[in-house]
Image (tube, rainbow, N blue to C red):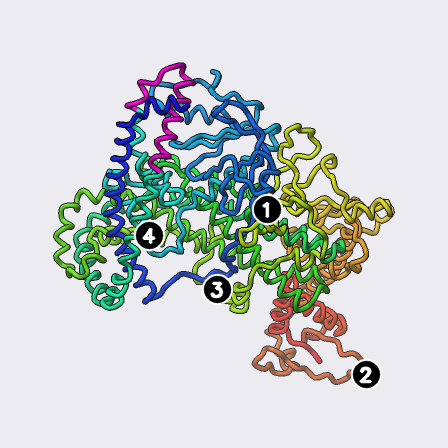
Amino acid sequence: MGDVVSSHLDESKREMITARTRDVMREFGDIYEQQYAVALFNSVRFEIEGGGGPQSQLLHRKDPLAGRCIFSGNLFQYLEENRKWRNRFVFVAHSYTISLYETKTAHDRGLHPKSTINCAGYKALTSMEEYMDLINTSLPGIKAKVSSSPFVKYATQFPLILWHPYARHHYFCVMTEKEQKKWHAVLQDCVRHTNNGLSEECRVQTPAFTDAVRLHRQAKGHFGTWDMMCGAPPQILANLVMETLHPELRNLIGPRLKGKMQQRQRNWMLISDAVYRQVLAQTTGQYDALVQACEAERPPLDAALRTDMDQMITSKEHVSSKIRALVLPKAEQLLRGSVQPYLSSILEALMEPTSRGFSEVRDVFFREMVEISKNSLNGGGKDKLGEHMERMSMLAFHPVKMQSCYEKVEQLNLEGLQQRFDVSSPSVFVHRAQILMREQMDNAVYTFEQLLHQSLEAQGEDDLCKTIQRCQDRVVKKYDYDSSTVRKKFFREALLQIIIPYMLKQLSPSYSTELPRFKELIFEDFSRFLLVENIFEEVVLQSVTKDIMMAVKEAAVQRRHNLYRDSIVLTNSDPNLHLLGENPSVDWATKFGGDEPEPEGSVGMRVEGGGSSRRRRQVVSMIQLDGLPLPYESCLEVPGVELIPEEEPEVSEVKRVSRVEEEEEELGSYEEPKSPDSVDEIRHLINPVVEVPVSEKENQTSLTNGTEPGSGTITLEDGVQEEVTLITTLVEGSPKKSDKVSPQEIVQRLVGNRKQEADKERQEEAAIKEIEIAVQEDERERIATESDAERLKDSSPHDDSGFQSPTNEGLDEGEPQPITNGLKGEDKMVDPAEVEVVLEQGDETLHSGSETGENFGEKMAQYASDVPCEI
């Protein structure tokens, strides 16, 4: 391997690589210094003027991964040095860097890993077909077929590959398809996290760096999104250098490679990796020196900005008005002709998969809430609650459980629009949406933790199920609002990333020669902070922002994809809740876990002070495959893995006996219900189909439309409402915590409650029909007798409210006075006792907020206003 690299990368070529990297870094450095001053101006202005959008309703955890390990397990790795497969223990720290150890014991002893992998810029693949398609693009004219023997021979038929356009590739394999899916989810999570971009907390360095990279690429004619804008700044700069250097070296060295096709591909990848490592080392040192130089000049620049900020803002507005008058006519013409016709289609392509992904996040969160509620109903106790909450605290960072959410967004497709608007691939938007989904899930979990902890501190463990339900309802409502706000912001940013580069590409050639003359309008002291090029881009941005805002607002007004209007989002609606955001995360294992001894060799731990002392904290994900005798301990089960069950294990996979199962062996009658894995199963659990015994068929009444009495089946409908009220309904008659509640008992209680509600509804409907009939007859008789003067003369005059009070002579004081319609003859008499019962039932129904109660109140109001009564 060394001979191949050294023979093709001699001293002259290495000097050429160094010189090319130095030239790119010098050009980038000049742009970065200019953009650093502009970013500092914007940061100080924002600090002085303030601003911001709608306030988040959910709490935000500041550092959710501090000191936590993410994942660990075993798999096979292919070694390039000896071309053999070796078993490796994989440990993923909170930074999502993959560390490979020879054994788990080596990791426990604190030894250095055999190798580490930073996944920035990589792609996780699961088939040789995908891999060969990417490999064939590396060398022009050299294409290998999938059927031909590749240079890597896999030991199993379940490969896992990390592919990078410039760096070294990594090859792994496992024994089963189940393992492959889980490991692929973990590798994708590592890639997603490292590709997330730069931290927005650095209000000066981050915008200065991103703008400098964008302007440097635009100067080379590259507009639009860039897939390799991922990783740390030195990695991004190395990708920037390799973007032009890599094709040149490929054309220079590719024809000189010897050997078979697979061997030439392998040799080229080794050469490319050596070049990338050399470039990365150089960009790292030069970027650090550049940042230090800019930071050293920051204090005097900051002082000058705070002194002359008002004058700078006035000068910038003056120059902006001049450039706007020049650019706006052509920009609006371009906008109407080439952007507006495609705006709705782009937005719809973004909204559909993104909204499905956020909806799946809500469903996953709901499923976890159902598990906790089931535990409380079955008397799990505080130890079981602590275990569930400790497992749920890192739900957002569980690669396997969140995979169903991420897959929804991966369906995003901009086909037909990518070439027109110079969008390289939708992966930039897919990764960003997935990161936002993970943040919203963590915010929801953290808010639920704080609310539940506060309620338990104030009320204790009494009525635990009701407490959980109340906290869940508050969190779900806040999640819906925050989800809408976050998605609208994402849609606006995505549209700007697609449209602005296209407009700049069309407008820049026309105005590049006219912009320099506007520099004369800026004072020399302000020229470092006010750049004409940046003002020009802001003018173009403002020209299209209004249309983008209107398109997103229209989607919110129409309630498409469950979006809300901005006016509906409550700002600071729950100030007491936001005070909880200052509290640290709840340590549920310590609070409810008791003093149980911790198993040795736990992987999920919090490392304190960077030393060797470790305390078990949380295993976010532990891939395991029970029941398979694997000689290499594939996906080794680690103590503490029970905290995060990735899915409900099969009967053959269960290795532990829970408390409920131990009691079942003693009693021999109770079987623990299986946890639902989907929303459909949850709804089936909430809306069961109960078979009625034959002896009771004659007395049963159908509770559903289309089911005749005596059919033997009762189906409970209104599942959406039952999802909200199930736990509350069950708790009203739930036994003590020491008692068990079987699924049959739960269903019987639910059926009994639904039957009572159905009986009450039937009584109300019968009373309403009776009143409606009386109202209709009274109305007909009153209209028919309006011309009868004698009858009107006998009646008392009406008051303003439409009531009339006829005399009640002839009625005994002790007799119940019937209520009539005020007419003689065959008047329909209504018993006051019946009306009183109906009114009481209507009041209860109105209090419950049901639709029947509302109709009943309306009918009674109409009856009181139109029909006179006799007292």
- What secondary structure do most residues of the magenta stretch adopt? helix
Q: In this picture, which residue range is highlighted in magenta?
A: 251-280
Q: Residue at x 26, y 65 (%)?
A: 303
**Mark before the other along the chain sequence, 3 or 1:** 3
Q: Is residue 681 visible?
A: no
Q: Is residue 322 left or right of residue 260?
A: left
> In this orientation, which residue lies closer to the viewer: 12 or 314?
12
Q: CA distance from mark 4 to mark 2?
A: 88 Å
Q: Residue at x 74, y 85 (%)?
A: 809
Q: Which residue lies under the disc numbered 2?
A: 814
Q: SS for tag 3? A: loop
Q: SS for tag 4? A: helix
Q: CA distance from mark 2 to mark 3?
A: 58 Å
Quadrant where the N terminus is found in the figure: top left
Q: Which residue lies under the disc numbered 1?
A: 620
- Between circles 2 and 3, the one closer to the viewer is 3
